[in-house]
Amino acid sequence: MTELKEKPAGEVRGPRKIWEGALRAVKGGGTEELVEQFTSEMTLVAEGLCEDQSRLRDAVQELQQNQTDTEQKLYSEVHALEREMEESRRDTDRQLKELSARLQAIERAVQQDQDKKEKKSRLPGGFMGQLTLIVGIAAGAWVVVTLLNLLRSVIAP
């Protein structure tokens, strides 16, 4: 209240003048200069942020393009591998069929050999077999002749 008594009678102080006075007292006299300096620094910061954002946008686009390229490359490699696997599967199937046919042919040949051996074992074969057959026929003939002689001697005494 002492302050109001000391001021001259013709001077009216409003809230704005009080505020400006307080700011001058605290900061000194160059408020417009400070505001101008602050504005220029903020403009510089905003421009830097804009450049950074532009660089980041470019980097994101580059990364997206790299990812797209990598996806396409992987897609191509996967399809190439699928084709190779399909060809390998077909080759394997073909080889398996060939081996199966060979195995069946071998089994038939073995079976035919076994059938031939069984036939040979039933009938004497080779030189010894033929000799045995001739001796058997001769022995059979001797037995028949002996029986006939025996019957003749019994019937005609």
Image (cartoon, rainbow, N blue to C red):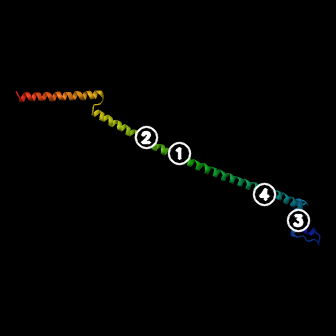
Give the crowd class for mark 4: few <14, some 14-19, many >=20 residues within 10 Å: few
Left or right? Give the position of 157 relative to 71.
left
Pointer 4: what residue? 50
Q: CA–CA distance between discs 2 and 1?
A: 21 Å
Q: CA–CA distance between discs 4 and 1?
A: 56 Å
Residue 139 coordinates in the image, percent (x, y): 19, 27
Q: Secondary structure at mark 4?
A: helix
Amino acid type assigned to the residue bearing label 2 in the image: Arg
- Going from N to C along the chain, the mark reached first, 3 or 4, is 3
Between circles 2 and 1, the one closer to the viewer is 2
Pointer 1: what residue? 88
- Going from N to C along the chain, the mark reached first, 4 or 1, is 4
Amino acid type assigned to the residue bearing label 1 in the image: Ser
**Most distant residue in the left direction:** 157
Quarter of the image with the C terminus is top left
Between circles 3 and 1, the one closer to the viewer is 1
Pointer 2: what residue? 102
Q: Secondary structure at mark 2?
A: helix
Front in this rendered view, residue 28 or 64: 64
Give the crowd class for mark 1: few <14, some 14-19, many >=20 residues within 10 Å: few
Q: Which mark is residue 20?
A: 3
Residue at horizontal 76%, vertical 54%?
55
Count of numbered circles on the image: 4
- Going from N to C along the chain, the mark reached first, 2 or 4, is 4
Residue 76 coordinates in the image, percent (x, y): 61, 50
Circles 2 and 4 in contact, beta carbons < 8 Å: no
Left or right? Give the position of 52 relative to 137.
right
- Going from N to C along the chain, the mark reached first, 2 or 1, is 1
